[in-house]
Amino acid sequence: MEQDKTPGKQVIKNMKLLVVGCGSIGKRHIRNLISMKAGSVTGCDADAEKLEYVKNELSAEGVPDLDEALRRNSYDAAFVCTPPSLHIPIAIKLLKAGLHCFIEKPLSDGLEGIDELIKISEEANKTVLLGYNLRYSTELKKIKALIDGGAIGKILFLKASVGYYLPYWRPSEDYRKGYGANKRLGGGIVLDASHEIDFIRHIAGEVDGVFAVSKKLSDLEIDTEDFAEVILHHDNGAFSQIHFDYLQSHYRRTCEIIGDKGMLLWDLNENILKQYGMKEKECHVYGEGLKPDFNYMYIEEARHFFRCIEGKEEPIINLREGKRVQEIIARIKESSAVNSLLAV
């Protein structure tokens, strides 16, 4: 690997990068890595149509089999972009082959194998980063800074909502074949949209209790839940509520944070961040320094991954953080099944 020391430029060049899984998110990462001039990029997917797209539209090499890819080349790092149920076995194989690993969210479809993955990653001494891209949003960073600076006082309650009609979610794919629609692949709206669980922990504190309802309400041809309402209790006394669905015809992702000295309103889709004080009509709208480009978050997380590989930063979402999100998801599903508040 060569290093580019030009100020403000990507610090690692000429890496050999492997993207495992060339669906919508895999294609995005390939496109971004090429635009960043991070090095040579190879896509790996058993789907011939996806590989043709990688070769013809993205001008990247394509390999149909992971073992073949690892035999053919020696890679520095890999991006794991397969359905969640495959994340852990693929990451273990890559770590044993000596690669640093970026793993798309969620870490897995359950808890099995996570401790083994953590052990292997520590023994291999390789960087592993979880891909919760909302952490790199300029709006979320601003929210965290405002909360930490006491702008709205003590957090009392937080309400987040995310929803979009599943057939529109990944328009290039038949929704019935995608992982979101299939339990065996790690689908369902709670796993698919687990960003909210991650960033709520980040800004509101650790979760110690869960009450949830998750159901399939629609006629969508899926065997997973398409709706969930979740209430979380945080160890600092705050409560949060998350609404998830695959039902809304218009994509929405919002968050309201209520403190004892004011409140924050964030609309990711509309690129709006507002702060309200306790006085009537006291409102400040943030715009300066915020980046509405949705792809910016993915570029930033890739840059962070490369800086972690260099040893200049520590992963902001490591395997243990990913495991904690999976533990909360497991309790959400258990709570819905038994209709009861559960400790986490």
Image (cartoon, rainbow, N blue to C red):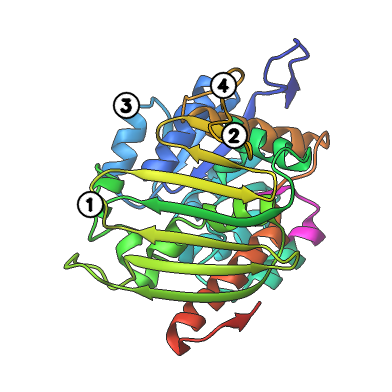
Q: Is residue 34 visible?
A: yes
Of residues 129 and 264, the one nearer the viewer is 264
The nearer-to-camera label among 1 and 4 is 1
What distance separates the C-alpha of mark 4 from that of mark 3? 17 Å
Circle 2 residue: 275
Instruction: Decide whether residue 28 is among the magenta residues.
Output: no
Q: How many circles with numbers are drawn on the protein?
A: 4
Q: Residues within 10 Å of mark 2 (few under 14, many from 20)?
A: some
In depth, the one of 292 and 181 nearer the eye is 292
What is the residue that sits farthest to the front in this orientation?
280
* Residue closest to the far bottom: 338
**Does residue 169 appear left or right of residue 328 in this picture?**
left
Bounds of the magenta segment: 121-129
Residue bearing the label numbered 1:
167
Pointer 1: residues within 10 angstroms few (<14), some, or many (20+)?
some
Numbered disc 2: secondary structure: strand
Q: Nearer the viewer, mark 4 or mark 3?
A: 4
Determine whether, in the image, residue 56 is placed left or right of residue 174: right
**Residue visible at 40% across and 60% down in the picture:** 244
Under mark 3, the amino acid is Glu
Calculate the distance from the C-alpha at mark 1 to the C-alpha at mark 2.
34 Å
**SS at circle 1:** helix
Relative image position of residue 170 (x, y in whole percent): 30, 46
Tag 3 residue: 57
Under circle 3, the secondary element is: loop
